[in-house]
Image (spheres, rainbow, N blue to C red):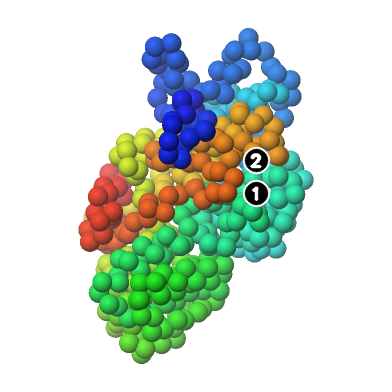
Amino acid sequence: MYRQETPKTGGRSRGRRRYQVCWRGHRLRGTTMLLIPLIVLVSACSGGKSQGASTDVLVVVSAPMSTEPWIGTFIERGARLAIEELNAHGGVTTPSGARRVKLAVLDNAGSPAKAAANARKAVDDHAAVLLTDGTGAASVASVTDPAHLPVFICFEGGEALIDPSRWPSLFRMAPANKPMARRLADYIANSRPKVGVISDDSTYGEQGRDALLQAFKIDEVEVVADQKAPARSSDLTTQVLAARQAGADRLVVWASASDVIAAIQAVHALGWKVPIYTGPTGEDPLVRRRLAEHPDWLDQVTFASFRMTSEVGPKPFEQFRANYEAKMGVDLVGVQQDGKQVVQPPDWPMFSYDAVHLIAASLSEGGELGKPLMEALNKVSITGANGDYRGYGPNQHEGVNPSDMYFARFHGFVFEPVADDPLSDTLPSVNQLQD
């Protein structure tokens, strides 16, 4: 749902038409009706008559549903929630008429070739938007750029994936690797660590490794081992042992959840007490399920990600979470702590959710799919699910502020912001136990 706000002067909101995702019922302030969706108001102003064509607005998800189910599921569920909300209020109203929104989910299985084929199908089916984890982004862009089909990357953070001058159809609605890697380097640099890096051969692993090595070089963090592994490995004993023998006193694993699990298992099999740092895949519930018999093994694991709550406080995220869990259900991790079920908070679903709402707002502004929608995306912004700004410009297709990265550490199967990082220490803990 949206309300139109007066564009602010100054800052990055200048000259934009802004919309806000709202959560409560109707109320009035002066003569402006605020919490009724703008897309419904447009239809009402026409006397309630249909404006002609009512072709559905198609949202396509292309994600690794079979190979990385956590990633695929959070992209699908966030999009589905947004679509249900939009349709409950009449869908999207464009100058050509009111249009309902529908969802199609395709499995790319982590394959660039399948991702490109899914993109071709999305173009053939006249989709309004393609939501993806980022698999095969360059190949996808070669299909979506000529068709002016906007693509939102909702997971992978490689720096090379976003270049508006080269791939104008690619937008990222997820944290980028570079600021996460820089924050991690800054976080550990003062202790003068000797770092062992393990990455996998996926684009997520390779581009994460590049960002880490650049960040460690800037902060003069010594990298004593740089090991690679196949994606979704079951045994990383060789790589972990090489890092230990090289004298590493920190282990950084930027790889699939399966590789994170294998690294933790190898560390403990070797009896090595070493702090382990990961990228966002450390949060994958699969890690906790596979280590269900050893909750203490996670106590030395810290992961880098984006903060769930915004500068305005925790209330917007709490409202989004309540709505998400009421309609999509609670995401159970599959393990228990203190006799209670551990719950995965819906942090990552916010990205696909915000992407769908941004598309809806842009269609209300631009009117039609293709080039008009692409142009509107560079002018329209919304306030997202957690209260953060979501919007782009012609030369800026990153959706998460670089300053919003934080670190979380596990305590058993529950994670919370670390206390020894200035930003993380200001963030509230988010409940992860089901009463």
Which of the 4 image quadrants contains residue 375? top right
Residue 399 locus on image (x, y percent): 49, 48
Residue 237 locus on image (x, y percent): 42, 83
- Callout 1 secondary element: loop
Left or right: 22 as drawn, with respect to 230: left
Q: Which residue is mark 2?
A: 374
Q: Residue at x 66, y 56 (%)?
A: 166
Mark 2 burial class by Cα count in 10 Å: few <14, some 14-19, many 20+ = many
Q: What amino acid is found at the position of numbered circle 2 in the picture?
A: Met
Residue 240 locus on image (x, y percent): 40, 82
Decide which of 161, 324 is in the foreground and name it. Answer: 161
Mark 1 burial class by Cα count in 10 Å: few <14, some 14-19, many 20+ = many
Q: Residue furthest right?
A: 124
Decide which of 90, 146 is in the foreground and name it. Answer: 146
Return the disc, 2 or 1, that comes first in the chain's sequence.
1
Q: Which residue is mark 1?
A: 169
378, above or below 114, in the image: above
Which of the 4 image quadrants contains residue 104? top right
Q: Residue at x 30, y 78 (%)?
A: 193
Q: Are marks 2 and 1 in contact (CB under 8 Å)?
A: yes
Which of the 4 image quadrants contains residue 178? bottom left
23, above or below 112, in the image: above
Q: What amino acid is found at the position of numbered circle 1 in the picture?
A: Ser
Quadrant the C terminus occupies = top left
